[in-house]
Image (cartoon, rainbow, N blue to C red):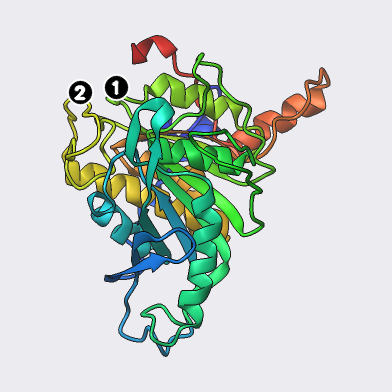
Amino acid sequence: MVTIKALSVTAGAALIFCGTAKVAAAATFNDAPLFNDAARYSTTISANNDIADIYYPNPSNLKTGNYSFPVALLLQGANVDKSDYSEYASTVARYGFVVVVPNHPRSLPQYGFTGLLPETSQIDAVLVQMKTENSNSASPVAGIVNTQKLGLLGHSAGGAVGLSAVANLCLSPIQCEGSFNRPNELLAGAFFGANLRDQNGVFFPINNSGIPVALLEGTRDSRALPINAEKTYEQIQNPPKALISILGANHYGITNTNNPTGPIPDPNIPTIPQDVAVETVARWSGFFLRASILDDKTAFDYVYSTGDALDPNVSVISQVKPVPEPSYTWGLVILSASSAVLGLKKLKPHRDARQWK
């Protein structure tokens, strides 16, 4: 069963043997976070007065170990308080990141909305703030932040903002006010319960310029339908990219509790325990950022090859390299088949959209 999940079904005994060897090797892999503990403090983002919680790895040799942790900005869902992400954010931090979780209040009277809602301007504001935190000797993260490397995390509306940022779009006024230019520091994004489409249901092309993108979605999400995550995945122009389905999770599989106070609830009851869902989303987010930002080969293999077979709570579709232009030469046909056998590109049957209705 594991072999069938991990590999294409078009090969014979040699392919099955290759897949079995890969799974056996992967079984020795430890998917636990790199650090046992994470710490947290709060600060004010000077550029916009947002209050933010900052999570960071906390080994005993934090100040003497010559650490340099990239920044991961978590863009919240609409009216989801930053405190509701504490378990997720602390777990991602333990994979080697300084995770920033701001509360960003906004007022959009034309839509009758006042509350917490992310926008693209937060990205530059947080980058500036983390440079200040890194150089301030009184800051708990002084000297340990790599401010040249940024990953985006996002939930729901925050994931949509992250996707538009990766695509270098300014979708006014809900996601962007004024203008936006994607910073050079932005190297990857992983977004849960999110898609990117207009009010008419038209999905935006996501010209990510080679920035790796992962979409994580709960199979019981009724607020951001899984089929819309799949359609958004198809719009991501450049691999690497991944679509990671969390089996049994609903729209709030990333928050400490199901249906936290404030946002619109998801009527679908999750069939996966909440703590398992949060850990799963955080683990895949952490590994995806490590693979994309830190060139961690072990993390890369986990995301694009071995992790799907090892984790019973997920199903993964991914693409590592661009699909070659159509050709009718036998040479390319043989090359394509060889790539599948060697695990260079993970292939899975396309899921029938009808299963999500």
* Residue 335, horizontal then vertical, whole percent: 73, 32
Residue 121, compared with residue 55, is above or below; it is: above
Mark 1 Cα-neighbour bin, 10 Å: few <14, some 14–19, many ≥20: some
Q: Amino acid at mark 1?
A: Ser
The quarter of the picture where the N terminus appears is top left
Contact check, label 2 and label 1, Cβ < 8 Å = yes
Which residue in the structure is indicated by mark 1? 222
Question: Number of labelled discs?
Answer: 2
Depth check, front residue: 112 or 57: 112
Q: Position of residue 297 (x, y in %)?
A: 54, 58
Rendering coords of residue 162 (x, y %): 50, 43
- Say which label, 2 or 1, has the lower sequence index: 1
Q: Quadrant of residue 91?
A: bottom left
Q: Residue 268 bears which disc, if any? A: 2
Percent of width and height locating residue 66? 48, 85
In which quadrant will I find the C terminus? Answer: top left
Q: Residues within 10 Å of mark 2 (few under 14, many from 20)?
A: some
Task: Tell me where residue 324 sits by quadrant.
Answer: top right
Q: Which mark is residue 233?
A: none
Q: Residue at x 31, y 24 (%)?
A: 223
Residue at the image point whose x is 50% and y is 20% from the top:
349
Residue 353 appears in view: yes
Query: Going by the image, does 21 lie left or right of 255?
Result: right
The secondary structure type at the circle numbered 2 is: loop
When the figure is inspected, residue 22 is found, relative to residue 6, above or below; the finding is: below
